[in-house]
Image: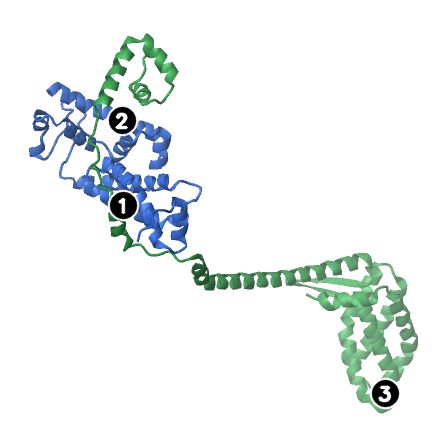
């Protein structure tokens, strides 16, 4: 039987004392939030669920190094973001949808290998949101993660830097480059429509 | 007029950077204001699909898939006991190392102390100790020890008689072994300008040479002659007087015993 009445600190102490079941309280409390950020970064449910499990597993294994004065939610969130970052960085070449970025302004548009999901068809069917999702995939893993944290998770530059383990200036530059690229692609779509 | 960069405008749109300064600039710059409006509009259009909802039982589902692969942490007590064996071995090794270092350090310290005692002793009372530098080693001769040996030899010489000529043999060996030390002490006494000691050691040197190098060995006649020629009784008295003159005889002897020769 799961014990949900324990707060995070009590659950961590119980786990470290040998009560494995106490970790259930932490898993149940934080899974949904981790799934949301993982989905936003990876862009699909299966990867996001894998990221949640991997993050919670890593968190369990590293629980001894967790400092009790910190917030477990923030700590496990950071682990999840890094797991998601690893996943999109490592699995990018295996995506069925291959996207190339050109430097020519005239040719500056999203190129989609999957003919069934071409930009014209997407635009014609009014699936702007889907097009944006595809444009997101053109970003590098760091840019995409930094943008998600800034634009969707509403994190400050310092928080993004801390979560991703990068210098604040790099985080700021990553957000800037991501917005710049997405705006260019949006501009292309606007012209075509 | 310097316009704001796209980066500054994007940061401003996200509520970062120098908000007041950028705002003031935008109020007075139509070009930047136009660009900023476009950025705001684009950012507002960047709406992505919300993550699919997870049911109320999602956490339980995650836990169900995770729990099987999580090993339980050992309680602090068991962990300590398990780690205790290695910890004990580590402590034992550390103690052994410490003991070995202490022992080696003690030996080194003792040797240095003995050397420094010998040096101080020679500086305080140059008559007592004589150093003879030789390649590779240092010989330290303590005068008090030499006078002791001389006294014993003179006593044995005095009591050697015709009936116990066999006793003369050890005298010869002892005299040979004392010759070098006697010369060192005599040389030292001359350097220290101690004529009484130098004279006594001269006489002793002559007697030791006779005893050590007598052609044909020692016999009753030779012993009697040497006793008379060297005035062994007088020399014995002189040696005893010189010996009593030396201060801290015991301490010097002790120091010599420990580190006199290296």
Location of mark 2 (residue): A177
Both on one chain, marks 2 and 3? Answer: no
Question: Residue under mark 1: which chain is it in?
Answer: B
Q: Which is more toward the observer, B38 or A108?
A: B38
Q: Above or below — where is B165 with respect to B147?
A: below
Q: Label 3 neighbourhood size at 10 Å, few (<14), some (14-19), many (20+)? A: some
The disc at residue B152 is none
- Chain drawn in green: B
- Chain identity for the colour blue used in the image: A
Question: What is the chain identity of the residue bearing mark 2?
Answer: A
Residue at coordinates 34% horizontally, 42% vertically from top-left?
A76
Asked if A149 appears above or below B6 in the picture, the reply is below
Q: Residues within 10 Å of mark 1 (few under 14, many from 20)?
A: some
Mark 2–mark 3 distance (CA, rounded to whole Å):
119 Å
Q: Nearer the viewer, mark 1 or mark 3?
A: 1
Mark carried by residue B220: 3
Location of the N terminus of chain B by quadrant is top left
Task: Residue at 89%, 76% (x, y): give it.
Answer: B230
Q: Please report the residue visible at 22 percent of the width from the left and 31 percent of the height from the top.
A: A139
Does residue B116 lie above or below B147 as drawn?
Answer: above
* Residue designated by label 1: B59
Do marks 1 and 3 share a subunit?
yes
x, y percent for residue B234? 93, 75
């Amino acid at each position: 039987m799961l014990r949900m009445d324990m707060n995070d600190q009590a659950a961590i102490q119980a786990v470290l004392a040998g009560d494995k079941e106490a970790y259930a309280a932490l898993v149940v409390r934080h899974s949904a939030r981790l799934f949301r950020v993982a989905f936003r970064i990876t862009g699909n449910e299966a990867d996001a669920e894998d990221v949640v499990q991997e993050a919670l597993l890593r968190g369990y294994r590293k629980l001894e190094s967790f400092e009790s004065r910190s917030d477990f939610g923030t700590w496990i969130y950071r682990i999840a973001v890094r797991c998601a970052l690893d996943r999109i960085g490592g699995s990018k070449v295996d995506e069925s949808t291959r996207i190339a970025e050109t430097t020519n302004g005239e040719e500056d548009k999203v190129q989609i290998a999957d003919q069934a999901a071409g930009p014209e068809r997407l635009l014609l069917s009014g699936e702007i949101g889907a097009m944006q999702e595809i444009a997101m995939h053109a970003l590098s893993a760091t840019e995409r993660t930094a943008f998600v944290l800034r634009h969707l998770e509403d994190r400050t530059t310092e928080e993004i830097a801390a979560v991703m383990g990068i210098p604040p200036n790099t985080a700021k530059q990553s957000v800037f480059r991501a917005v710049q690229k997405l705006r260019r692609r949006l501009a292309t779509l606007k012209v075509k429509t | 007029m310097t316009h704001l960069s796209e980066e500054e405008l994007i940061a401003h749109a996200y509520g970062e950077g120098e908000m007041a300064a950028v705002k003031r600039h935008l109020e007075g710059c139509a070009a930047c204001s136009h660009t900023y409006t476009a950025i705001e509009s684009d950012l507002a259009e960047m709406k992505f699909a919300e993550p699919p909802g997870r049911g109320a039982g999602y956490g339980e589902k995650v836990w169900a898939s995770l729990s099987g692969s999580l090993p339980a942490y050992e309680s602090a007590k068991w962990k300590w006991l398990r780690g205790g064996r290695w910890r004990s071995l580590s402590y034992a090794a550390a103690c052994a190392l410490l003991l070995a270092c202490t022992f080696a350090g003690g030996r080194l310290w003792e040797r240095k102390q003995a050397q420094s005692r010998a040096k101080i002793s020679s500086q305080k009372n140059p008559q007592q100790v004589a150093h003879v530098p030789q390649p590779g080693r240092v010989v330290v001769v303590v005068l008090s020890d030499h006078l002791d040996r001389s006294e014993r030899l003179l006593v044995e010489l005095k009591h050697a008689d015709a009936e116990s000529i066999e006793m003369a043999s050890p005298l010869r060996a002892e005299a040979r072994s004392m010759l070098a030390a006697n010369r060192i002490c005599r040389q030292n006494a001359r350097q220290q300008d101690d004529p009484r000691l130098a004279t006594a050691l001269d006489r002793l040197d002559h007697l030791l040479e006779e005893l050590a190098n007598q052609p044909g060995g020692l016999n009753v006649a030779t012993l009697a002659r040497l006793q008379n020629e060297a005035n062994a009784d007088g020399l014995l008295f002189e040696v005893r007087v010189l010996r009593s003159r030396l201060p801290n005889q015991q301490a010097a002897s002790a120091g010599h015993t420990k580190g006199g020769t290296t």
